[in-house]
Image (tube, coloured by chain):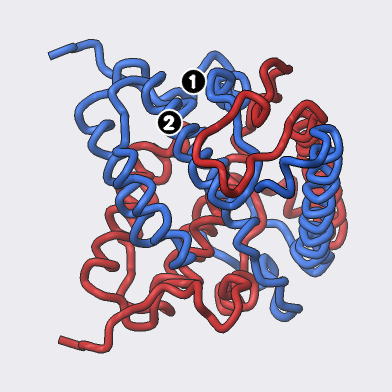
Chain colours: A red, B blue
Amino acid sequence: MSQIASKPTWLISQANLRNHLHRRAKTLSSLSRRLRHIYHPKYTHANRDTSSVQPKDVLNKGKSAAPLTKEELGRATWTFLHTLAAQYPEHPTRQQKKDVKELMAILSRMYPCQECADHFKEVIKVNPVQAGSHAEFSQWMCHAHNVVNRSLGKLVFPCERVDARWGKLECEQRECDLQGTTNFD
Amino acid sequence: MSQIASKPTWLISQANLRNHLHRRAKTLSSLSRRLRHIYHPKYTHANRDTSSVQPKDVLNKGKSAAPLTKEELGRATWTFLHTLAAQYPEHPTRQQKKDVKELMAILSRMYPCQECADHFKEVIKVNPVQAGSHAEFSQWMCHAHNVVNRSLGKLVFPCERVDARWGKLECEQRECDLQGTTNFD
């Protein structure tokens, strides 16, 4: 820590930014490899009106994809979780509150990277899930993500801006929104 | 369906491939916009040894990110789910079997796109979760994804190749793997 603290702030930021951009470039390269695999011309298209998969609809042989990294898995999962928080109703039902708490508990046991799951278990033990409202849950999610990011030496996010970063899903007339309750018992 | 069937197969494949590549290019463009937002130079780095977020660690002002599309959310969530299936133990414990079934039930209520969640509820009603072993769960996940993809007119995946497409997480000496049970009661 003291070694880093002795450097000028702008130098740390530049170096870290370079590292992050390098990692991101690796991810894009990996994504490109996956796309070549998935969009191989031998793939054909499933017909909307077809109720079963015909032999011509699938690829019969091909190469393996590169294994997913922990970082790629983390990015995908946080994308899902922050969107869940963004769409979480202002006035959730009891079932919705129960569901998101249970979801976090399941992730702390079953997130498909054991050491990450174990760490997340500690995070939610120290920071119990807050899901009484949209604001409460999205702030809790942002805070939990920052706790994880800090432990990994990664960027933290200013939680007062979480609604701007993770807005409602792009969906006409808000028809995708999860509905909450109008009963406040 | 009959209109499509009257076209030569290679022509259908080429057209569909073009559509898919176009959609994928849009996604990459959207990703690029997000990266510009996230990796803005004003972001600084959280120190690994710092237990609280200091003012210099966060961005105090900035732009909003573009809203996530249903397709981006879907891709992120399937990445998480297929990796979960890939890491699912050969001999899961009772708790693990219960957890993944409950996770799918929660997704059918809380997936942050209501119409998608409603559709997924139908999918798991017709195709109850099979989670007795790694093979069973990864095949079930692949099948469930294909049911969703077919309904959207998207590509389907040959499930006999699911282990090659969604392999174990990239992790040294398999230390990330979820552990199952050795008791077969």
Residue A26, numbered circle: none
Identity of the amino acid at label 2? Gln
Look at the picture and state if A160 lies above or below B44.
Answer: below
Which residue bears the numbered disc 2? A114
Q: What label sits on residue B175 in the rendered view?
A: 1
Q: Secondary structure at mark 2?
A: helix
Q: Could you classify mark 1 by the number of other residues whose Cα lies within 10 Å: few (under 14), some (14-19), or many (20 or more)? A: few
Is residue A121 something one can see in this rendering? no
Query: Where in the figure is residue B26, as x and y percent of width and height?
Result: 81, 58
Residue B41, located in which quarter of the rendered image?
bottom right
- Picture coordinates of residue B122, whole percent (x, y): 35, 52
Residue B85 appears left or right of A49: left
Q: Mark 1 belongs to which amino acid?
A: Glu
Does residue B136 appear in this view? yes
Determine contact: label 2, label 1, CB under 8 Å: yes
Q: Is residue B65 above or below residue A155?
A: below
Helix, strand or loop under label 1: loop
Question: How far from the left and from the top, in percent, is residue B10?
Answer: 84, 33
